[in-house]
Amino acid sequence: MAMNPEVDWQTWSRSRQEQVEAALEQALPAGTQSPESLHAAMRYAVLGGGKRVRPLLAYASGELTGADPRIVDAVAVAVELMHAYSLVHDDLPCMDDDALRRGKPTCHVAFGEATALLAGDALQSLAFSVLAHSKLRNAGEACALLADMAGAGGMAGGQAIDLAAVGAALSLPDLERMHRMKTGALIRAAVLLGATCGSEPDASLRDALDAYARAAGLAFQVVDDILDVEGSAASLGKTAGKDAAHGKPTFVSVLGLEAAKSRAEELRAEAHAALARYGRSGRRLTELADRIVDRHS
Amino acid sequence: MAMNPEVDWQTWSRSRQEQVEAALEQALPAGTQSPESLHAAMRYAVLGGGKRVRPLLAYASGELTGADPRIVDAVAVAVELMHAYSLVHDDLPCMDDDALRRGKPTCHVAFGEATALLAGDALQSLAFSVLAHSKLRNAGEACALLADMAGAGGMAGGQAIDLAAVGAALSLPDLERMHRMKTGALIRAAVLLGATCGSEPDASLRDALDAYARAAGLAFQVVDDILDVEGSAASLGKTAGKDAAHGKPTFVSVLGLEAAKSRAEELRAEAHAALARYGRSGRRLTELADRIVDRHS
């Protein structure tokens, strides 16, 4: 059931985080069931960590259209599984070659490269399975959107641009395009699919959600780049300073630290403005934009 | 349009192969469009090679329910993209570390490991995109089936069992279970989804198709193992003898060569028997089972 709109952010977000943990736990195959190592690697990559930003976006967006959070579960789980798969593959030696994620050894360090590769592959399949088996009004359309946001025109395409950009000087528009694909597309899927779990969004709400998702998604990345410079491995749970060390262009390297901070504030304002006309029903999304900009990890 | 049922196998299969080549070409992103290297790697992995067995199974199954082959295109493309992604990842250094596929350098040899990894990832997404955007009666259900056949309970799970089996002595039932997941699941998806493109299959047709797919899928693998021993790299377009060299259990290593050949014949007979009551409308599937058993590459 939708929660009392008067509960504070802390209570609301904690309750939704617990809800998605339980839903993820249930969606993943049991670690005791064959093939055990694959299942264990999938569970390891998904459970016990992560801020669950994409699920929160889905639930927050569902609140705007009066969706039953139990229906939103499928969207929340699907986007988080997709995100988890992308992290597993991104950490592999042939990509970022990262040993630490969410304060733990990365999946390939814990399970070996081959199993991590397959775990990522199977998590992507599972994301579609959960969405396709869900009670969404149009599960086929939902799968189409998720597939387009995950593929060559979205997340995977953004990763490829990121790869090619190592050591290169990207212009600000090119950097923004890369991040709109690499992280923005899945955030957009979370927001748009979350909203379709309630009353059908009209064109103007869809546009507003799109503008919100675009701003919030980019803000997420700008803040990530700031934290990569200012944060520590202890608070981030991953290797700090790695983007700079890898010669990857970031908002900080392109804009400078202070201008990057101003850009994050501009994007927060854009996210708020996009939902201004929806008043209290946009409250959770607005609060979430604030948390995205104000976070320290 | 469905073809004159009197045309011979050669004409029918060539026409369907041309049709799926054109549909694949259209479904893949242009190599000239950014990110170019990712798109080029995806196209390289899919186009210009391959027997297109899974698409042929989808079209042949569609004939049984009177489907318009243009509707079956989406199924044919989706299963072939899924198959192509699995080959790209399977060939990676952390998996089979193979340098030759379909007579050409493997995708990671041609494009580098990171791009090959992402190309595989994006091909999986694209498979779902094509199916979800299709004109199938129930695209959501189709995506659910494809996802379950591709994931931890299907293809990816079979790969994981295969990994764990290197150097181990598998029993015949375990070997068959592995292959039912690793290659059988996607063959089953091709057959079942192809049939849903025409008039709704009833329970007994669904059972018959399932029995057919199970037999044909296993036959495909048994013959693969026989060819791995008897074939040459020139006729196979891939490294021969690699399974034995990798210490992987095969039907030949478990059963012996002659018994493996008898098993292939048994499975051919099972595939024929499953469709016997459907007479001429099952003709293409029956012919395809023959081609699977009689092939030399």
Image: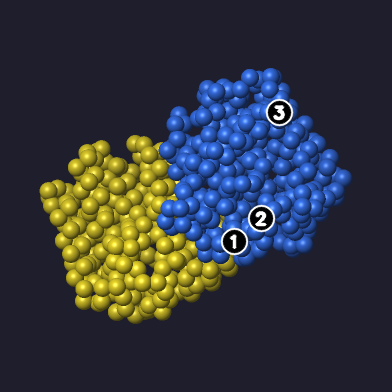
Chain colours: A blue, B yellow
Q: Position of residue A66 (x, y in %)?
A: 57, 22
Q: What residue is pinned by disc 3?
A: A9
Q: Position of residue B76 (x, y in %)?
A: 35, 52
Q: Chain of mark 2?
A: A
The residue shown at (26%, 56%) is B214
Q: Mark 1 packing: few (<14 Cα in 10 Å), some, or many (20+)?
A: some
Q: Chain of mark 1?
A: A
Q: Secondary structure at mark 3?
A: helix
Q: Position of residue A127 (x, y in %)?
A: 50, 45
| Residue B161 visible, this angle | yes
Q: What residue is pinned by disc 2?
A: A104
The residue shown at (61%, 22%) is A3
**In the rendered image of this protein, does residue B239 appear above or below residue A4?**
below
Label annotation for residue A110: 1
Q: Secondary structure at mark 2?
A: strand
The residue type indicated by label 1 comes to Ala
Q: Badges 2 and 1: C-beta atoms under 8 Å apart?
A: yes
Q: Nearer the viewer, residue A145 or A101?
A: A101
| Residue A146 visible, this angle | no
The residue shown at (25%, 38%) is B200
The residue type indicated by label 3 comes to Trp
Give a yes or no on whether discs 2 and 1 share a subunit. Answer: yes
- The C terminus of chain B: image quadrant: bottom left
Q: Secondary structure at mark 1?
A: helix
Query: Where, by quadrant of the figure, is residue A98 drawn?
Result: bottom right
The residue type indicated by label 2 comes to Lys
- The N terminus of chain B: image quadrant: top left
Q: Nearer the viewer, residue B236 or B254?
A: B254
User: How many angstroms separate mark 2 from mark 1 (CA)?
Assistant: 9 Å
